[in-house]
Amino acid sequence: MSFGTSLDTFEDKTGHTPCESIYMAMQCDKYADSVKAAEFFDWIKTDFGLGREHGIVHVLVIKMRLSLASNM
């Protein structure tokens, strides 16, 4: 599954866009450099019933956003 397809599948299954999922992750304290990927994968699985691949894509999206924010 491609990066874009994984994000589309997340939106199809949850009704939330990737940006909305990042906001939700912030609300659940899952959006920080200190959060381990495994914790995020557990959150994706528990709250949304999605697997590790979707978690990996979202961790990458979050890490990219954190990286961009720290470089501004």
Image: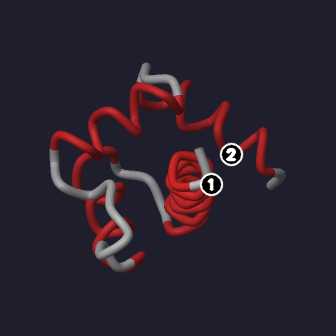
Image quarter in which the N terminus is found: bottom right
Which label is found at residue 6? Answer: 2
Q: Residues within 10 Å of mark 2 (few under 14, many from 20)?
A: some
Left or right placement of residue 34 versus residue 51 in this view: left
Q: Which quadrant of the figure contains the C terminus?
A: top right
**Sequence order check, earlier mark of 2 and 1:** 2
- Residue linked to disc 1: 64
Above or below residue 32? Residue 24 is above
Q: Percent from the top left, x then y, of residue 44?
A: 35, 55
Residue 49: image location, x then y, percent? 35, 51
Of all residues, the one furthest to the top in this rendering is 15
Q: CA distance from mark 2 to mark 1?
A: 16 Å
Give how far across and how far down residue 66 sits, in percent: 50, 54
Kindly indicate the quadrant of the structure image that contains residue 20.
Answer: top left
Decide: is 23 above or below 61: above
What residue do we see at 40% from left, 35% from top? 21
Towards the viewer: 42 or 27: 27
- Amino acid marked by disc 1: Met
Give the residue drawn at x 77%, y 40%. Answer: 5
- The answer to which of 28 and 32 lies nearer the viewer is 32
Query: Which mark is nearer the camera, 2 or 1?
Result: 1
Amino acid beneath label 2:
Ser
Does residue 40 lie above or below 48 as drawn? Answer: below
Task: Classify residue 14 as left or right of residue 67.
Answer: left
Q: Residue furthest left?
A: 28
